[in-house]
């Protein structure tokens, strides 16, 4: 637990206003020709002082409540089995195409089939749900990388981010190099807690220039990140990376990217899929692979005391109203004399 602090400390500049109730107001005085004739009123003096204290307390509590008092929850070490896993999901327009099983012959059936992004979204959602001890981050990419969720163990947040990728349609371009560099940057500065994985889900590749390749190579090695690529073949004419060999950086984009990934010093696995069932099998195999000891630091929520101070201000105000109700506001009028009719 950390020390007491304020979320908006500038409100505390209003605290001197709490001294105003200590100032005597002329309206509070009642004129009387001979004070010595009045009996001692200890109860009245007590109620008067109590009213001043309650007024000061109400103002102080209200100002402190506005300043947002609280205590930083700090952090705690947690352990489990799993991985720090960053999902790097392709949201280019090609992912909006339908997933066509090998046995589909009639073109009229294509429109009723789910798109690649729909299938991927559902499988990733199941994957996240089955791994409660993992810490996930999520980045979508097309023409640029779009970091959506930083590393968290709040899986509901990750599920919401996955669902949000179903809104609208993708953009035409795929900047794989920029996306990979953004994924590596997400691990930068974090203490190494266990297995680290970037899970790339895409139906295309890229021919990366030499400076980009070197930055990716150095970043993956420096942050000790493994790389998994779920490659979704768009059609039968797409490169079959399980059969291709001897590719170069100038080959077709998918083969060029696969060749580069295979040359990395860090662990790399390819999961080539042709339909929804193969995608599901790939996700199931990844789930079995990454189940290693994981130790990480979890941030605890901040304790907020605003409601307690606002409640104190409310109770003080109610007490002040009671004191004001007991206070004599004006001298009672003497009864009118009876008029006697002369006999």
Image (cartoon, grey):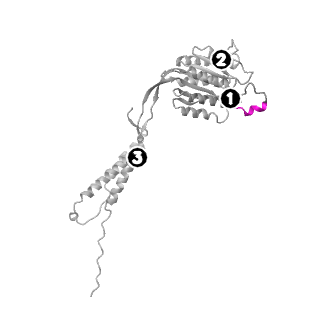
Residue bounds of the magenta highlight:
107-116
**330 displayed left or right of 78:** left
Q: Can you tell which quarter of the image residue 198 is in?
A: top right
The numbered dot on residue 310 is: 3
Contact between labelled residues 1 and 3, with CB atoms less than 8 Å apart: no
Image marks 3 and 2: residues in contact by CB distance under 8 Å: no
**Callout in the foreground (3, 1):** 1
Q: Can the viewer see residue 22 in this picture? A: no
Q: Earlier in the sequence, mark 3 or mark 2?
A: 2
Dividing the picture into quadrants, the one containing residue 205 is top right
Query: In the drawing, what numbered circle is on residue 116?
Result: 1
Q: Which residue is denoted by mark 2 in the rendering?
A: 258
Magenta segment includes 94: no
Seen as rendered, the residue at the extreme bottom is 343
**Whole-number angstrom distance, CA of label 3 to CA of label 1:** 52 Å
Q: Residue at x 27, y 55 (%)?
A: 46
Residue name at image x 72 percent, y 32 percent: 113
Position above or below: 70 against 182: below
Asked if the stretch drawn in magenta spans residue 110, the answer is: yes
Q: Circle 3 — which element?
A: helix
Task: Tell which tag, 2 or 1, sits nearer the viewer.
Answer: 1
Say which residue appears at 64% left-offset and 23% top-offset. 281
Name the N-terminal-most of marks 2 and 1. 1
Residue 332 screen position, x and y as percent: 30, 68
SS for callout 2: helix
């Amino acid at each position: 637990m950390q020390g007491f602090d304020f979320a908006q400390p500038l409100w505390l500049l209003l605290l001197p206003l709490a001294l105003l109730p200590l100032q005597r107001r002329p309206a509070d005085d009642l004129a009387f020709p001979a004070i010595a004739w009045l009996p001692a009123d200890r109860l009245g003096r007590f109620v008067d002082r109590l009213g001043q204290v309650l007024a000061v307390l109400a103002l102080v509590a209200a100002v402190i409540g506005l300043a947002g008092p609280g205590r930083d929850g700090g952090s705690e070490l947690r352990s489990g089995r799993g991985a720090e896993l960053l999902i790097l999901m392709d949201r280019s327009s090609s992912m909006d195409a339908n997933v066509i099983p090998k046995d589909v012959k009639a073109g009229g059936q294509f429109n009723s089939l789910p798109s690649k992004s729909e299938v991927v979204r559902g499988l990733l959602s199941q994957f996240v749900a089955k791994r409660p001890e993992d810490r996930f981050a999520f980045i979508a990419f097309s023409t640029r990388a779009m970091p959506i969720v930083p590393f968290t163990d709040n899986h509901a947040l990750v599920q919401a981010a996955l669902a949000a990728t179903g809104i609208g349609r993708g953009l035409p371009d795929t900047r794989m190099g920029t996306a990979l560099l953004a994924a590596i940057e997400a691990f930068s500065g974090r203490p190494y807690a266990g297995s680290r994985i970037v899970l790339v889900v895409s139906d295309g590749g890229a021919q990366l220039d030499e400076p980009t390749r070197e930055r990716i190579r150095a970043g993956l090695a420096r942050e000790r990140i493994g790389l998994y690529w779920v490659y979704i073949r768009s059609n039968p004419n797409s490169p079959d990376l399980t059969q291709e060999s001897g590719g170069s950086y100038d080959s077709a984009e998918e083969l060029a990217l696969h060749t580069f990934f295979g040359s990395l010093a860090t662990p790399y696995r390819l999961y080539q899929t042709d339909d929804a069932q193969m995608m599901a099998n790939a996700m199931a195999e990844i789930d079995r692979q990454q189940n290693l000891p994981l130790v990480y630091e979890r941030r605890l929520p901040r304790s907020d005391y605003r409601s307690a101070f606002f409640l104190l201000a409310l109770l003080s105000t109610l007490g002040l109203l009671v004191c004001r109700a007991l206070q004599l506001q004006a001298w009672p009028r003497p009864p009118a004399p009876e008029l006697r009719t002369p006999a």
